[in-house]
Image (spheres, rainbow, N blue to C red):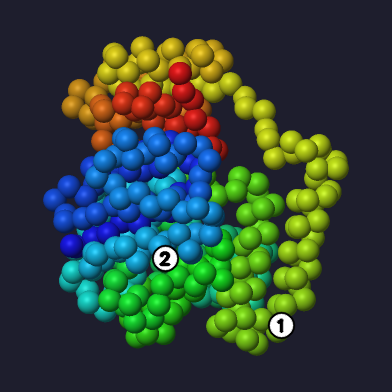
């Protein structure tokens, strides 16, 4: 077996469905297996996904043991020479999968490989490559110096943003959202450290790979990442888990850094916990994490059948603003939304019919309008579900 794809999922069945659809298309021609480890989801994933994807190996955990534990369960069942640790809130391309496997084949020194991740608005995701975290690097990240001076090796090391994102480069830390791994190395250095419930487990593994004498690489082949839909939506909760896990990372690999940062990080974690459990619910009410969704405007490209279904779904979900419907596919209108004469800024989403456009083409087109107000949405006639960012899913 050449490649084992391991996906850990928790209450994101429609994002997982889309991810699996893209994976099945992307691995064509590669001897592969797909393993999904479900962390005790309560959204019906266990009934829905195996029925839609019979070739996927479904492993249901009785409780949520965390991201590291879920991946380790998947790794233990994998038989591939290479492993792909993949988030369910991603859309992968054939280019990224095939070129990464080819790179691993021809570069035996590569222990882990990451790829070019694209944000929901077509911009480059800075976390596609990262450097080893030290108190100085953390300070540059926290104060925004790394974004203010991205080309500086002194200030920009957190994202290694001084490297050309269109070139292959050795890096230090690979993102666990899409991380190709050489299984024989993991068999020697161990799987993910389960002390990390969420976040920094990829940095820990990347660092251990470097210490084993191998290299980590960044490849400029794109995938799409919703970023965060597979975890807790609240930014406060994200920061809480991020800083809690950073303490573990420092304690494990850099004892001096741990001593220096212990009190500041403890204070940050305590304040975040106070805000999450007491301050915000008291000030904003128990539903403080929910938000009111404003009406959206869509540019819809796809078959006539898909458009009629989409019209019905948007109407049912009270998305009644004027939308632009274009009967098109990858052959008749290969430039997709770039061919639209109307101002793209008047719309919130470009909604592609997945049967009319390949995921590779969608992502390639989205990259040509980076930073635009237009974001990617997708529709499948098989599931009759519209997927947008921010966890929003529209169904009939």
147 lies left or right of 313: right
357 lies left or right of 144: left
Answer yes or no: do the residues labelled 1 and 2 have beta carbons within 8 Å?
no
Residue visible at 24% across and 45% down in the picture: 55
Residue 9 percent across, percent down from the top left: 45, 49
Q: Is residue 279 above or below residue 162?
A: above
Residue visible at 23% across and 68% down in the picture: 81
Camera-side residue of 73 and 322:
73
Which label's residue is closer to the chain start, 1 or 2?
A: 2
- Res. 224 mark: none
Q: Is residue 223 above or below residue 349?
A: below
Q: Element at badge 2?
A: helix
The C terminus, quarter of image? top left
Tell me the residue that label 1 is attached to.
Answer: 260
Closer to viewer: mark 1 or mark 2: 2
| Location of residue 175 by image quarter | bottom left
356 lies left or right of 314: left
| Location of residue 49 by image quarter | top left
Residue 150 percent across, percent down from the top left: 52, 63
Separation of residues labelled 1 and 2 (CA atoms): 32 Å
The N terminus, quarter of image? bottom left
Tell me the residue that label 2 is attached to.
Answer: 72
| Residue 31 in view in this figure | yes
Camera-side residue of 298 and 164:
298
Residue 33 percent across, percent down from the top left: 24, 54
């Amino acid at each position: 077996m050449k490649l084992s794809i391991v996906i850990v999922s928790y209450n994101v069945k429609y994002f997982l469905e889309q991810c699996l659809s893209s994976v099945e298309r992307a691995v064509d021609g590669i001897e592969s297996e797909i393993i999904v480890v479900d962390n005790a989801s309560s959204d019906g994933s266990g009934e829905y996904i195996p029925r839609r994807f019979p070739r996927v190996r479904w492993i249901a955990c009785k409780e949520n043991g965390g991201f590291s534990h879920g991946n380790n369960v998947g790794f233990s069942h994998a038989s591939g020479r290479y492993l792909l640790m993949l988030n369910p809130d991603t859309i992968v391309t054939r280019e990224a999968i095939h070129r990464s496997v080819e790179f691993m084949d021809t570069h035996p020194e590569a222990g882990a490989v990451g790829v070019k991740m694209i944000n929901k608005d077509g911009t480059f995701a800075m976390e596609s490559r990262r450097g080893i975290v030290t108190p100085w690097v953390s300070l540059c990240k926290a104060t925004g110096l790394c974004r203010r001076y991205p080309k500086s090796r002194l200030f920009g090391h957190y994202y290694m943003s001084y490297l050309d994102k269109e070139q292959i480069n050795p890096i230090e830390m690979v993102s666990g959202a899409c991380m190709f791994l050489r299984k024989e190395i993991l068999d020697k250095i161990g799987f993910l450290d389960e002390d990390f419930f969420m976040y920094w487990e990829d940095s820990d593994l990347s660092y251990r790979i470097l210490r084993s004498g191998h290299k980590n690489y960044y490849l400029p082949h794109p995938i799409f990442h919703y970023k965060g839909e597979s975890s807790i939506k609240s930014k406060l909760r994200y920061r809480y888990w991020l800083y809690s896990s950073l303490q573990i990372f420092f304690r494990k690999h850099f004892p001096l850094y741990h001593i220096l940062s212990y009190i500041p990080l403890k204070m940050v974690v305590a304040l975040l916990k106070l805000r999450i459990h007491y301050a915000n619910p008291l000030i904003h009410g128990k539903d403080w994490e929910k938000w009111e969704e404003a009406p959206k405007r869509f540019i819809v490209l796809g078959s006539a059948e898909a458009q009629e279904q989409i019209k019905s779904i948007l109407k049912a979900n009270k998305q009644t603003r004027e939308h632009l419907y274009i009967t098109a596919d990858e052959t008749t209108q290969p430039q997709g939304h770039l061919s639209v004469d109307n101002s793209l800024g008047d719309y919130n989403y470009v909604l592609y019919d997945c049967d009319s456009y390949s995921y590779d083409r969608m992502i390639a087109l989205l990259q040509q309008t980076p930073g635009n107000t237009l974001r990617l949405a997708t529709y499948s006639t098989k599931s009759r579900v519209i997927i947008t960012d921010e966890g929003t899913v529209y169904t009939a």
